[in-house]
C-alpha cells in the first residue's frame, strides 16, 4: 500500500509542475524532453547492478519499451497542454478517469472479477468525466473537449499497455529494473530528434526550462517506479490499483490546484468530481 500512496503523491505533483510552467516561462515540450533525459539517467544509475546494452536489447520487453517510450512523450505533452489551458484539475480528471479502459482490459484479458459495483462505477465515471471537465464559458466547444477527451483515450490505452507489459514480461526473476529507464531513454531520444529538426524549439532551451525539466524528470521517474511496484504486488489486482491510484491523484491535484493556484471549479465541475470519486470507489469496492 505504501507504494500506491507514493505513486499517488508523485503523480499529483506532475500536474502541479505542468501548471507552474507558464508562470516561469518554461517551454513545455523542451522541458518534457529534458524530463525524460533526466529520468533515464536516474534510472540507469540507481541500480547497483552493471548496465550492459547488449543484455537490454535482448530482453523480451525491449519492443514494449520502444512503443511506450515513443507514446509517452506525446501523451505527456498532451497532459501538459491540457493542464495549462484548462487547469490541473481538468487535466487530472481526464487523465485519471481513463482508469475505465485498463479496468475493462483487466476483465477481458486477465480474468479480473466483474460485478454490478464495477459496472455501475464505469457508467458513473463517464458522466463524472463529462461534468468535471465542462467549462461554463467555452469560446470554442471543439477545442474545449478535444484536449481532455484525447487525454482520456490516450492515457487509458497506455495504462492498459503498461499493465500488459508488467503481466507478460515481469516476474520475481525478471523485474523492471532497466525497463523503466529504457523507455525513458527512448522517449528522450525521440524528443531530441524532434528538437534538432526544429530550430525554433531549440531556442527555448533556457535555465528555467532546464531546471523545470530536471525536477519533472525526478518526480516522473518515482511515480512510474512506484506504480510498477504496486502492480507487481501479489495481493493487488490491476482493477484495484488503477482506481485507487487515480482517485487519489484527482483528489490531491484538486487540493493542490485550489491551495496553490486558487483554481475555482464551477458547481457542475464539483458535481463531476464527486461523481468521479463515487465511481472509482464503487469500482474499488467491487473487488
Image (cartoon, rainbow, N blue to C red):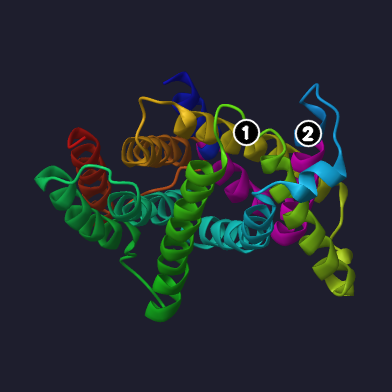
Residue 174 numbered tag: 1
Q: Of the numbered discs in the image, which one, if any, rests on residue 21? A: none
Q: Which residue corresponds to the image point at 18% horizontal and 46% vertical from the top-left?
A: 114
Quadrant containing the N terminus is top left
The stretch drawn in magenta includes residue 139: no
- Give the structural element (helix, strand or loop) at label 1: loop
Q: Residue at x 24, y 60 (%)?
A: 126
Q: Is residue 175 left or right of residue 86?
A: right
> Is residue 33 shown in magenta?
yes
Label count reads 2
Apparent side of residue 227 relative to residue 49 in the rendered image (left or right) = left
Instruction: Where is residue 84? Give x, y as percent.
Output: 56, 57
Label 2: few (<14), some (14–19) or many (≥20) C-alpha neighbours in 10 Å: some
165 or 116: which is nearer to us? 165
Q: Is residue 286 above or below residue 279?
A: above
Q: Are dots 2 and 1 in contact, CB under 8 Å?
A: no
SS category of the residue bearing label 2 = helix
Could you say which is closer to the camera, residue 86 or residue 36?
A: 36
Boundaries of the magenta span? 12-41
* Residue 70 percent location from the top left of the image: 67, 62
Q: Few, some or many C-alpha atoms within 10 Å of disc 1 (few <14, some 14-19, many ≥20)?
A: few
With 141 as the anchor, is 68 left or right in this view?
Answer: right
| Of residues 60 and 270, the one drawn nearer to the viewer in this rendering | 60
Q: Which mark is residue 42?
A: 2
Q: Residue at x 81, y 24 (%)?
A: 49
Where residue 63 sits, quadrant-wise, is bottom right
Residue at figure coordinates x 40%, y 67% from the top left = 149
Amino acid at each position: 500500500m505504501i507504494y500506491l500512496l507514493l505513486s499517488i503523491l508523485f503523480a499529483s505533483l506532475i500536474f502541479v509542475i505542468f501548471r507552474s510552467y507558464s508562470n516561469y516561462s518554461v517551454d513545455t515540450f523542451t522541458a518534457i524532453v529534458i524530463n525524460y533525459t533526466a529520468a533515464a539517467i536516474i534510472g540507469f544509475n540507481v541500480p547497483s547492478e552493471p548496465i550492459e546494452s547488449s543484455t537490454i536489447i535482448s530482453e523480451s520487453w525491449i519492443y514494449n519499451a520502444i512503443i511506450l517510450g515513443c507514446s509517452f512523450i506525446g501523451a505527456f505533452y498532451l497532459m501538459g497542454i491540457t493542464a495549462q489551458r484548462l487547469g490541473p484539475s481538468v487535466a487530472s480528471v481526464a487523465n485519471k478517469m481513463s482508469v475505465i479502459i485498463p479496468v475493462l482490459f483487466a476483465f477481458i484479458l486477465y480474468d479480473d472479477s466483474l460485478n454490478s459495483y464495477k459496472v455501475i462505477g464505469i457508467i458513473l465515471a463517464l458522466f463524472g468525466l463529462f461534468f468535471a471537465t465542462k467549462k461554463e464559458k467555452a469560446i470554442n466547444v471543439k477545442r474545449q473537449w478535444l484536449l481532455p477527451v484525447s487525454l482520456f483515450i490516450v492515457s487509458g490505452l497506455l495504462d492498459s499497455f503498461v499493465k500488459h507489459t508488467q503481466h507478460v514480461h515481469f516476474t520475481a526473476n525478471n523485474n523492471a529494473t532497466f525497463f523503466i529507464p529504457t523507455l525513458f531513454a527512448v522517449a528522450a531520444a525521440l524528443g531530441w530528434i524532434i528538437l534538432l529538426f526544429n530550430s525554433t524549439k531549440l531556442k527555448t532551451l533556457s535555465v528555467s526550462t532546464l531546471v523545470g525539466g530536471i525536477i519533472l524528470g525526478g518526480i516522473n521517474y518515482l511515480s512510474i517506479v512506484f506504480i510498477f511496484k504496486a502492480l507487481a504486488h501479489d495481493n493487488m489486482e490491476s482493477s484495484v490499483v488503477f482506481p485507487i491510484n487515480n482517485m487519489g491523484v484527482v483528489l490531491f491535484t484538486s487540493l493542490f490546484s485550489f491551495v496553490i493556484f486558487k483554481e475555482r471549479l464551477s458547481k457542475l465541475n464539483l458535481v463531476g468530481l464527486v461523481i468521479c470519486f463515487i465511481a472509482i470507489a464503487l469500482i474499488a469496492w467491487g473487488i
